[in-house]
Image (cartoon, rainbow, N blue to C red):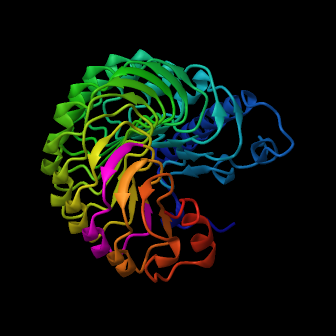
């Protein structure tokens, strides 16, 4: 019988090592499989639920929907089951996915607590889901945290301030309540902060202004009260902030001129008073001013005409007075102008409005405007807009 070639033989210790490595890899992937099957068992059965059909013990776990494995170690490294309409809870076994670096289960209907075991996954850098345990602060490598679009509640723990590498934080569209802890000001690498559509209350903490790298800030649709913190006006990197539908009081400060990167602000439906600061006209890239449904008084600043990037002005349902500034005619990119229901805006519609060739909506009704609607400047509006926006005020 022909002997095997010496070149094809492997030393016995190496054969044993490879065999043990294979057994270890199989054990580890079986651990991952068991963890994911535990997650599946905590999801309410639904005939439309793809996980019920796809995640089976017979199939290779690395071929399951939403699962990505590392080719070198054959371990689960990423799990993305977002936007699948899933209902259920997160089991502690999820913490056994020891190679996991990215977890996305956002935009579902998970509820209940986040198991503390999840924060034992040392490589985890991206986390998207659930209610917040105190152990969150131990997840020191976390850079992206989103619990958006679920049904989680409770308070934000002060330990949130320990996650110093965090760049994106979203608790939006849940049922969180209570105050925002001042420790959030420790997250100096944060670029996006979304706390919108919850039940948060109390004052907006001054420490928000310490987030000098922040680009986007949303606290819309909550129960925040008190004034806009003065520290906000020192945030020179901020592109937008949205505090719509809260209970904020006080006025918008003239220090807004320091927010040189600001493009959009949303302050609709609060209880703000005072005047619109003319310093907004000094912001070079500003494009959307939304302050309707407050108690703002004074004139519409003519300095708004400096903002040639402006696409929307929403100042209806206030107590503004005076005439419509002719300088607004410079806003050739403006798409919508709302000054409706101020009741005190007087004079005629300036002919310069005819230069606003991008305008699609002009809402001026319930004011003290004079002149005939048939003398409105010739503007290239859609017919539907022309029919609905101008006939609402009475000819004098």
* Residue 343 against residue 6 in the figure, above or below: above
Farthest residue, direction right: 47
Whether residue 255 sits left or right of residue 82 in the image: it is left
Whether residue 322 sits left or right of residue 147 in the image: it is left
Task: Please tell me which residue is depicted at 83% across the width and 38% down the height of the picture.
Answer: 46
* Residue 71 against residue 26 in the figure, above or below: below
Farthest residue, direction front: 396
Q: State the image quarter where residue 250 is shown.
A: top left
* Residue 217 against residue 175 in the figure, above or below: below
Task: Please tell me which residue is depicted at 34% across the width and 72% down the height of the picture.
Answer: 350
Instruction: Answer whether residue 332 is magenta in the image.
Output: yes
Instruction: Answer whether residue 354 is magenta in the image.
Output: no
Magenta stretch bounds: 318-337
Whether residue 26 sits left or right of residue 50 in the image: it is left
**Looking at the picture, how far across and down is residue 205, in whole percent?**
27, 25
- The one nearer the camera, 281 or 283, is 281
**Looking at the picture, how far across and down is residue 189, in whole percent?**
23, 41
* Residue 290 against residue 91 in the figure, above or below: below
**Looking at the picture, how far across and down is residue 40, in whole percent?**
72, 34
Q: From this viewpoint, is residue 239 visible? A: yes
Task: Please tell me which residue is depicted at 55% across the width and 50% down the height of the picture.
Answer: 69
């Amino acid at each position: 019988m022909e002997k095997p070639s010496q070149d094809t033989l492997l030393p016995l210790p190496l054969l044993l090592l490879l065999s043990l490595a294979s057994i270890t890899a199989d054990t580890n992937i079986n651990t991952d499989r068991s963890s994911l099957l535990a997650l599946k068992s905590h999801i309410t059965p639904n005939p439309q639920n793809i996980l019920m059909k796809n995640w089976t013990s017979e199939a290779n776990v690395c071929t399951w929907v939403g699962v990505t494995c590392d080719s070198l170690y054959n371990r689960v490294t990423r799990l993305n089951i977002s936007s699948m309409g899933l209902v259920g809870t997160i089991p502690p076994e999820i913490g056994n996915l020891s190679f996991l670096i990215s977890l996305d289960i956002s935009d579902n209907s998970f509820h209940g607590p986040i198991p503390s075991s999840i924060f034992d996954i040392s490589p985890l850098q991206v986390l998207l889901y659930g209610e917040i345990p105190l152990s969150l602060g131990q997840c020191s490598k976390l850079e992206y945290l989103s619990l958006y679009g679920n049904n989680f509640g409770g308070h934000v723990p002060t330990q949130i301030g320990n996650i110093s590498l965090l760049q994106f934080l979203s608790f939006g569209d849940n049922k969180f309540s209570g105050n925002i802890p001042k420790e959030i000001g420790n997250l100096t690498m944060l670029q996006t902060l979304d706390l919108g559509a919850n039940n948060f209350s109390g004052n907006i903490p001054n420490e928000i202004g310490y987030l000098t790298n922040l680009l986007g800030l949303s606290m819309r649709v909550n129960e925040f009260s008190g004034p806009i913190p003065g520290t906000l006006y020192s945030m020179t990197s901020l592109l937008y902030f949205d505090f719509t539908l809260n209970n904020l009081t006080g006025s918008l400060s003239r220090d807004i001129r320091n927010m040189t990167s600001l493009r959009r602000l949303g302050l609709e439906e609060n209880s703000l008073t005072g005047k619109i600061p003319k310093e907004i006209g000094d912001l070079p890239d500003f494009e959307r001013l939304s302050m309707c449904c407050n108690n703002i008084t004074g004139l519409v600043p003519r300095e708004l005409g400096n903002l040639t990037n402006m696409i929307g002005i929403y100042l209806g349902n206030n107590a503004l007075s005076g005439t419509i500034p002719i300088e607004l005619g410079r806003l050739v990119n403006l798409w919508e102008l709302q000054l409706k229901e101020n009741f005190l805006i007087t004079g005629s519609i300036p002919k310069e409005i005819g230069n606003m060739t991008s305008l699609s909506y002009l809402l001026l009704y319930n004011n003290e405007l004079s002149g005939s609607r048939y003398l409105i400047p010739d503007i290239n509006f859609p017919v539907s807009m022309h029919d609905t926006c101008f006939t609402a005020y009475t000819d004098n």
